[in-house]
């Protein structure tokens, strides 16, 4: 027996029951009118089809999710969600293709739709707060299209990451690493009462004016820890991120980099040290899928 022997990973009816229990804990909800009254199962129809009495709409639990209109069986979707949630450094589309025995383009489609479900979206509350520490750092990865390799990092993609010690991460694909590129994002996503930790990079010099405190270590002088002053937490995030991007995915597309970043943020922010196991990560991803309607007819956009 294995985790993937669970009924909802093998049987379509059980998969619908699992998704309904996750997305409709209080009972079926009509995606059109939001009503919960007089919703009945449609007898003799396709799996999971229901009918709303007030608005007469027929629907299944997949409506309004990335599963809608997909020709892939729901139990296979749930396998893909679990594998992506439980693989620390990710799982490639080729590997998913072999495990699920589907075409590569199908596996690629599925992985990108699941990444969309993992994305936290906008309107999140600020990180940190009084007495809390958020580490900030940026990294470079991949190579920009039509730009030859050169000294420095101008030819690479830039990623900014904010990590709250003992908490969650939030990353962004940014245009560059200048203060004008980074400071607006940092100020918009971190509570002013927070203590900030960075390295000695010049673009962070003005942070002390906007936050409760700002300390930094000087990596150029071989300093990595000075008491509680360090950026090792965010460096640890990058160690997993880069191992996944280079070892699993290998190619870093500028068009889709924000989706890969969201995937690593999701797993970090729902990790075991925060009391979250693989099954709970899967449920969190399924709940995130609600409202993110992307079908085969919808092209992937940056």
Image (spheres, rainbow, N blue to C red):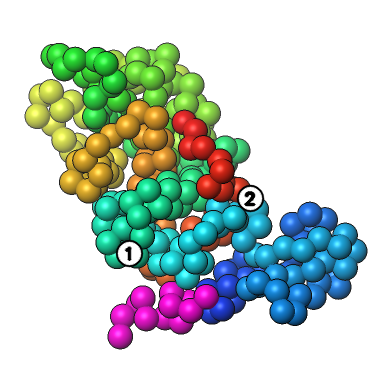
- Magenta residues? 1-12
Query: Disc 1 versus disc 2: distance between alpha carbons?
Result: 28 Å
Q: Residue furthest right?
A: 54
Measured from the top left, where is residue 149 in percent x and y? 16, 17
Quarter location, residue 28? bottom right
Is 65 one of the magenta-colored residues? no
Q: Return the mark for residue 291.
A: 2
Q: Which residue is mark 1?
A: 101
Closer to the camera in the image, 293 or 170: 293
Whether residues under marks 1 and 2 lie with C-beta atoms below 8 angstroms apart, the answer is: no
Q: Is 116 placed left or right of 153 in the picture?
A: right
Measured from the top left, where is residue 121 in percent x and y? 54, 41
In the rendered image, the vertical position of residue 83 relative to residue 196, given as above or below: below
In the rendered image, the vertical position of residue 127 relative to residue 12, given as above or below: above
Mark 2 crowd level (few <14, some 14–19, many ≥20, 10 Å Cα): some
Picture quarter with the N terminus = bottom left
Quarter location, residue 49? bottom right
Main SS class of the magenta portion in the image: helix
Q: How many marks?
A: 2
């Amino acid at each position: 027996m294995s985790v993937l022997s669970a009924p909802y990973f093998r049987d379509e009816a059980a998969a619908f029951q699992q998704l309904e229990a996750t997305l409709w804990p209080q009972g079926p909800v009509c995606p059109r009118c939001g009503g919960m009254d007089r919703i009945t199962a449609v007898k003799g129809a396709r799996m999971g089809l229901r009918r709303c009495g007030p608005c007469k709409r027929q629907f299944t639990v997949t409506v309004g999710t990335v599963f809608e209109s997909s020709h892939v069986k729901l139990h296979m979707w749930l396998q893909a969600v679990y594998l992506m949630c439980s693989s620390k450094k990710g799982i490639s589309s080729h590997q998913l293709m072999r495990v699920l025995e589907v075409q590569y383009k199908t596996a690629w489609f599925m992985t990108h739709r699941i990444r969309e479900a993992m994305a936290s979206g906008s309107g999140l509350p600020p990180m940190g707060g009084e007495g809390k520490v958020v580490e900030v750092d940026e990294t470079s990865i991949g190579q920009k299209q039509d730009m030859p390799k050169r000294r420095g990092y101008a030819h690479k993609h830039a990623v900014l990451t904010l990590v709250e010690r003992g908490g969650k991460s939030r990353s962004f694909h940014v245009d560059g690493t200048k203060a004008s590129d980074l400071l607006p994002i940092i100020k918009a996503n971190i509570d002013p009462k927070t203590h900030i930790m960075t390295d000695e990079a010049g673009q962070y010099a003005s942070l002390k004016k906007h936050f409760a405190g700002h300390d930094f270590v000087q990596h150029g002088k071989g300093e990595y820890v000075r008491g509680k002053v360090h950026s090792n937490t965010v460096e640890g995030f990058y160690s997993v991120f880069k191992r996944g991007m280079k070892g699993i995915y290998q190619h870093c597309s500028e068009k889709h980099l924000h989706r890969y970043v969201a995937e690593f943020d999701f797993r970090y922010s729902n990790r075991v040290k925060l009391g979250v196991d693989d099954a709970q990560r899967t449920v969190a991803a399924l709940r995130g899928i609600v409202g993110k309607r992307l079908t085969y007819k919808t092209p992937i956009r940056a």
